Amino acid sequence: MSVVVGVGVIIINDKGEVLLGKRTSKHAPYWSIFGGHVDPGETFEECAIREIQEETGLTIQDPKVYGVCNNLETYHEEGKHTVSVCLLAHHPGGEPQLMEPEKCEQLIWCDPNQLPEPHFEASRNAIKLWQMEKLYLIA
């Protein structure tokens, strides 16, 4: 088994809300920020831009890496070990779309202090790191 590297992208709007999606297939029924696996040869920023475009139709500009999380709870539950590089991007304007309805059934803007449940571990970790202004939290 190998460890998978992914990105998690917090998109924040002018009200300080974050964009969340409700997953339908893998990781259903969890709420989560958007992101995905890094492709070979791809930078974290390129991955973030690509995944957000594929999943929401939004074209984010200049996402910034701010942290990393090791998602061990998910590993113990599912047997899949991911390390998430966390990035922050500002909402570029326009309405996010459900581009992959087979993976995500609903989009919401949400106060990061009132996350809907159940919430995906990697997403919760990424939001906590951002709020605490930490690079990494030891589980």
Image (tube, helix red, strand yellow):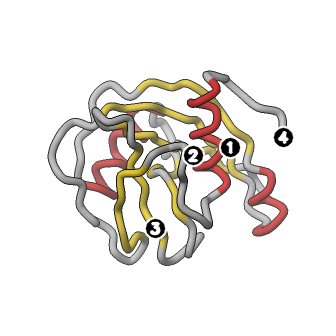
x then y, percent, for residue 59: 23, 41
Mark 1, residue position? 83
Query: What amino acid is found at the position of numbered circle 1 in the picture?
Result: Val
Mark 2, residue position? 6
Q: Are marks 3 and 2 in contact (CB under 8 Å)?
A: no
Which mark is nearer the camera, 4 or 1? 4
- Tell me the number on the disc at residue 22: 3
Mark 4, residue position? 139
Q: Check disc 3: other Cα within 10 Å, few if <14, some if 14-19, many if 20+.
A: many
Query: What amino acid is found at the position of numbered circle 2 in the picture?
Result: Gly
Q: Do the residues labelled 4 and 1 touch (CB within 8 Å)?
A: no
Q: Is residue 121 left or right of residue 23?
A: right
Which mark is nearer the camera, 3 or 2? 3
> For residue 138, what is the image quadrant?
top right
Q: Which of marks 4 and 1 is nearer the N terminus?
A: 1
- Specify the farthest residue to the left: 94
Question: What is the secondary structure assignment of the residue under circle 1?
Answer: strand
Q: Which of marks 1 and 3 is nearer the N terminus?
A: 3
